[in-house]
Image (cartoon, rainbow, N blue to C red):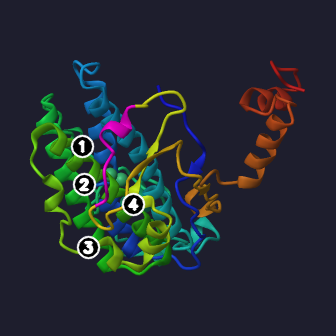
Amino acid sequence: MILRVDRLQIEMDMPEQPDPAAASAVQELLGGRFGEMSTFMNYTFQSWNFRGREKVRPYYELIANIGTEEYGHVELVASTINGMLTGSSSGGDVTDTPLKGVMPPPNPHQFIVNGQSAPVANSLGQPWQGDYVFNSGDLVLDLLHNFFLECGARTHKIRVYEMTDHPIARQMLGYLFVRGGVHALAYAKALEELTGATVSKLLNIPNVPNSKFPETRQWEDRGLHRTLYRFSETDFHNLGAVWTGTHPDDGQEVSVEQGPPPGGQAADFPESPEHFAPGYDPGELAEIAKRMMDGAGGAGFVGRAAEKLGVKGDGAQ
Ligand code: MN
Ligand code: MN
């Protein structure tokens, strides 16, 4: 089973300016074939479908554990897209064409379908697909695929980096370059141990080191490129059997750290009445939620209907 921590994996600033064009490119990193939904679902399903796991437990744990980290990467990219879209419509009366400012929308679904937020789709607006998951059941083949997937993901991230200097896109990318580097190296180490092939010699793909990107520095200075987080309070104690030895970039020992990174408070993006998000009258919704949290109850449809009819409904005050 999976527990959830309501924090982003990094502290992320609230952006001052929107950039819907760049946000539509970032969609590829969320719902594209090489996006975070793909890494998340590939490793997660490989772990759920893993046969004979007790015999090769460290490899099972590695795949399951990285899959759990990827869940939070999907969240981080979605948060980046939300931040980059915030402020791109003008607000005001729904009859005043408040969304005219987003025309022509780089990704119409972000606005028409999702109310100025992130669909589970790629940069062309095509939905993420289950057949992006490769799971042959053969451990070496699946690990080789995962190594390839991390390298493809890195290629796409670098290209998106080349498209935008939006500050929160760069914050997200700097962190994910470093974490993706850990995953690619972890799969390389796993393959090396199993087959004897020195897969890590293939790195970096593309042949640009992470240190080239200034946004990686704060993470590499803290050694995050050598750190595998254990995303479980109780399990996955065999990760160190695979995540061992040195890092090829700096020759220093890699290590496993207990628990997820401290991360940062998830952003609370402002309401957007022109998209009816979270409702046409956010003030009224806030009032209802406050009454619920105060324990007063009776704030829902039934309570309000009962109030209108002058009867005392279930849970009404
Ligand atoms: Mn990732
Ligand atoms: Mn990854």
Q: Which three-letter amino acid code belongs to the residue tagged 2?
A: Glu
The answer to if 49 sits in the magenta stretch is no
Q: Which three-letter amino acid code belongs to the residue tagged 1?
A: Gln
Between discs 2 and 4, the one toward the N terminus: 2
Residue placed under numbered mark 2 in the picture? 150
Between discs 3 and 4, the one toward the N terminus: 3
Q: Which three-letter amino acid code belongs to the residue tagged 3?
A: Arg
- Provide the secondary structure element on which disc 1 rests: loop
Q: In the figure, residue 136 lies in which quadrant?
A: top left
- Spatial distance from mark 1 to mark 4, Cα to Cα? 30 Å
- Provide the secondary structure element on which disc 2 rests: helix
Residue placed under numbered mark 4 in the picture? 225
Please tell me whether mark 2 or mark 1 is closer to you in this view. Answer: 2
Residue 110, placed above or below residue 60: below
- Spatial distance from mark 3 to mark 1, Cα to Cα? 22 Å
Residue placed under numbered mark 1 in the picture? 129
Instruction: Tell me the crowding category of disc 2: few under 14, some 14 to 19, or many 20 or more residues within 10 angstroms, Cα based.
Output: many
Q: In the figure, residue 81 lies in which quadrant?
A: bottom left
Q: Which mark is residue 57?
A: none
Q: Which span is picked out in magenta?
A: 238-247
Between discs 1 and 4, the one toward the N terminus: 1
The answer to if 244 sits in the magenta stretch is yes
- Provide the secondary structure element on which disc 3 rests: helix
Q: Position of residue 165 (x, y in %)?
A: 41, 81
Q: Which three-letter amino acid code belongs to the residue tagged 4?
A: His
Instruction: Tell me the crowding category of disc 4: few under 14, some 14 to 19, or many 20 or more residues within 10 angstroms, Cα based.
Output: many
